[in-house]
Amino acid sequence: MLVYFAYMVLRGSINEDQQGGRISAVYNIFAYPIMIALIYILSRMTDSLHPGNGGNPGFSTYDTDSRLLAVFYPAIIGWVLMSIWIMQLRLRIRKIQRRLNNFKLHGGL
C-alpha cells in the first residue's frame, strides 16, 4: 500500500503531464521488482502467519473454518455489489456532466 501511495503522491506532485508520466513510469519499473520481493520472497523467508510457510497450510481445506466462510462469502458478494453500484453512480454522473456540457455549448435556454 505504501508503494502505491508513494506512486500516487509522485504522480500528483508533478504539474506537467508528460514529465509526471515519465517519472512515474521509471518509479513503476523499480517498484514492481521490489513488490515481488516484499510480497513473495520476504514473507516466505521466516516463520510467519503468511500462507504456505512454516507449517501454515496456505489456502487448503484446513485454512478456513466453516463459520468463517459463512461470513466471508456474503462479505465478498456485498463488496462486489457495492463496487457495481459505485461504478453505476460514476457512469450516471459522467452522463449528466456530458449533457450539461452539451447544453452549455448549444446556448442553454
Image (cartoon, helix red, strand yellow):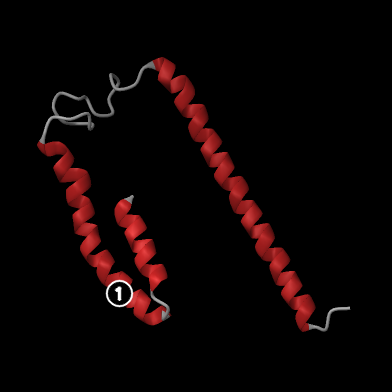
- Kindly give the residue lying farthest to the left in the view shown: 45
- At a point 58% along the width and 42% down the height, the residue shown is 82
Q: Is residue 11 placed above or below 66 in the rendered structure?
A: below
Please tell me which residue lies in front, 23 or 74.
23
Q: In the figure, is residue 90 to the left or right of 8?
A: right
Q: Is residue 102 placed above or below 63 in the rendered structure?
A: below
Please tell me which residue lies in front, 3 or 57.
3
**How far across and down, in percent of the image, does residue 73 sit?**
47, 28
Mark 1 surroundings within 10 Å by alpha-carbon count, few (fewer than 14), some (14 through 19), many (20 or more): some
**How far across and down, in percent of the image, does residue 9 sit?**
37, 64
- At a point 10% along the width and 38% down the height, the residue shown is 45
- Identity of the amino acid at label 1? Ile
**How far across and down, in percent of the image, does residue 27 sit?**
26, 67
- At a point 24% along the width and 60% down the height, the residue shown is 31
Residue tagged 1: 23
Q: In the figure, is residue 53 to the left or right of 100?
A: left
